[in-house]
């Protein structure tokens, strides 16, 4: 039996792995039309993982034609819901059967600790695909209340060709949040993974085809945002564009939709989430442990990271001593080691960007109380120590801009009104947490915070049954839950006169 808790086991598997970097179009691996590739190196040690197809406009045009043709034929879009359900359940079974391979690809591709990739990312992807499959024959259409001589039908139809552009921090999970409901509702899908982490997307498409999803229904075009991503966003025959990533790119995609065919655009963008700890929190030790996890998990490369820790001034010294102690338990290590809880930053560019923010924090007067440096873990790897800044004011750069790294900004507040003012003083509105033992205060704060997800006395809760998305410049629409299906269907009203 495989010893998944053994460092040497994963090192050996990594040495044997030969990732496929080609595009997946119409049920087959293929090169980019222009033959171009880019080298994909691992952030762990800069080893070459694959030469990946660098797709562009020609690939987008050809793949959209394939996706449209299969949609119009009805190979998937008109398949009985129970049949689509069986195929997607088979897809999930194959994901489970290949769980170690997928986790290893995720680990090598973007630096995620192998233990997290296996238990969180693979399991989350499985849960999403199975949940969406199970929902397929649970979605009912409606009849409007009409006179006896009329019937008013309200039906859902697939939106059509869906282009999904997903990020590099949770490549497989974020992809599943898009392809799950899109496939479940009968659409044709073109997935554009980040050039920083394209490998699991390609493998997922292969498994989907093996499970019985018809050729041309689920395609993957690796490449860059300014080439194939832009081509899909501007394409006149793409009906829906879904995106997770930065607010800057989300805004640009909305512009592209307006410049082309008014395609539906649903975005989940940046965040600068407040984690608010009141003096009356029921368990300050638990709150401190969660505060450390909220910024250190996945190297801080999380859109909902608790990057702004708001602490009531009366407990700041005591509470921050606890937080620093817990941050000390998060140490960069080789992501292939199952004992590692902080892996590699996705690439050198991102590492340098995070280090640049740390320098800005120092320059603007922040007090560095933990970390703050590049960590030497593996030769030619990209690692950063979890970092804590105290004495931060909310107008500082590191309190306003999304860093996407393990950098915590600690801000004190004097009372409930002050906490709410600081929490909402941001362009973002993705998530927030509130720690208090006062039920009234918890409800007042939860109502007052402008965020799509609010957690009380814990951080980062929820599962497939609850919607996920943001207010303000954190995006529109929702992933997960039955609400996600609205993004991938069009509502049609059909009125029938009976006499």
Image (spheres, grey):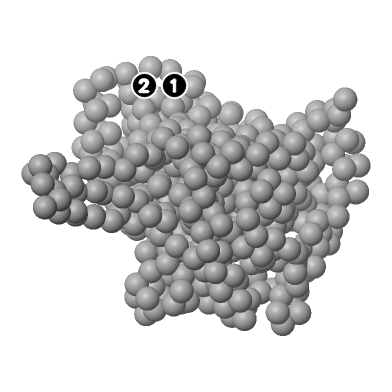
Toward the viewer: 147 or 443? 147
* Residue at image point 44% right, 77% down: 236
Neighbor class of circle 2 (other Cα within 10 Å; few <14, some 14-19, many 20+) is some
* Residue at image point 81% right, 30% down: 4
Give the residue pinned by disc 2.
281
Look at the numbered discs 1 and 2 and tell me whether their residues touch, using CB distance below 8 Å. yes
Is the residue 64 above or below the residue 319 in the image? below
Q: Quadrant of the N terminus?
A: top right
- Note whether residue 101 is visible: yes
Q: Provide the secondary structure element on which disc 1 rests.
A: helix
Spatial CA distance of label 1 from label 2 is: 6 Å
140 with respect to 44 (left or right): left
Q: Quadrant of residue 334?
A: top right
* Residue at image point 37% right, 80% down: 259
Give the residue pinned by disc 1.
284
Q: Position of residue 73 (x, y in %)?
A: 53, 63
Q: Position of residue 258 (x, y in %)?
A: 34, 75
């Amino acid at each position: 039996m495989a010893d998944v808790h053994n460092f040497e086991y994963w090192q050996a598997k990594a040495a044997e792995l030969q990732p496929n970097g080609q595009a997946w179009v119409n049920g087959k691996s293929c090169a980019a039309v222009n033959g171009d590739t880019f080298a994909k190196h691992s952030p762990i040690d800069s080893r070459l993982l694959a030469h990946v197809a660098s797709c562009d406009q020609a690939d987008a045009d050809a793949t959209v034609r394939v996706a449209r043709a299969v949609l119009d034929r009805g190979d998937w879009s008109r398949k009985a819901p129970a049949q689509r359900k069986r195929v997607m359940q088979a897809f999930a079974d194959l994901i489970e059967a290949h769980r170690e391979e997928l986790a290893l690809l995720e680990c090598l591709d973007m630096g995620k600790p192998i233990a997290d990739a296996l238990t969180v990312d693979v399991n989350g992807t499985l849960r999403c695909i199975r949940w969406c499959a199970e929902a397929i024959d649970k979605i009912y259409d409606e009849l409007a209340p009409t006179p006896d001589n009329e019937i008013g039908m309200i039906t859902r139809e697939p939106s059509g060709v869906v282009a999904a552009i997903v990020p590099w921090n949770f490549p497989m999970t974020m992809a599943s949040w898009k392809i799950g409901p899109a496939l479940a509702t009968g659409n044709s899908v073109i997935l554009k993974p980040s050039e920083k982490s394209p490998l699991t997307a390609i493998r997922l498409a292969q498994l989907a085809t093996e499970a019985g999803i018809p050729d041309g229904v689920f395609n993957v075009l690796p490449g860059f945002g300014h080439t194939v991503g832009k081509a899909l966003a501007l394409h006149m025959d793409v009906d829906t564009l879904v995106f997770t990533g930065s607010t800057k790119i989300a805004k640009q995609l909305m512009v592209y939709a307006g410049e082309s065919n008014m395609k539906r655009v649903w975005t989940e963008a940046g965040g600068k989430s407040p984690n608010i700890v009141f003096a009356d929190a029921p368990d300050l030790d638990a709150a401190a442990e969660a505060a450390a996890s909220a910024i250190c998990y996945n190297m801080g490369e999380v859109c909902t990271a608790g990057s702004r820790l708001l602490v009531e001034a009366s407990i700041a010294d005591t509470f921050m001593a606890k937080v620093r102690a817990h941050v000390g338990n998060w140490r960069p290590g080789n992501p292939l080691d199952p004992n590692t809880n902080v892996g590699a930053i996705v690439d050198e560019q991102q590492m340098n960007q995070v280090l640049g923010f740390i320098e800005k924090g120092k320059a603007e007067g922040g007090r560095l109380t933990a970390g703050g440096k590049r960590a030497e873990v593996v030769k030619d790897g990209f690692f950063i120590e979890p970092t804590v800044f105290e004495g931060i004011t909310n107008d500082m750069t590191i309190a306003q801009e999304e860093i996407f790294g393990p950098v915590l900004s600690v801000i004190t507040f004097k009372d409930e009104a002050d906490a709410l003012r600081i929490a909402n003083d941001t362009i973002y509105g993705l998530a927030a947490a509130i720690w208090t033992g006062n039920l009234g205060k918890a409800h007042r704060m939860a109502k007052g915070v402008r965020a799509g997800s609010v957690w009380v006395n814990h951080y980062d809760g929820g599962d497939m049954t609850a919607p996920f998305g943001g207010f303000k410049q954190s995006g529109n629409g929702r992933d997960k839950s039955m609400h996600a299906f609205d993004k991938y269907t069009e509502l049609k009203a059909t009125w029938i006169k009976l006499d």
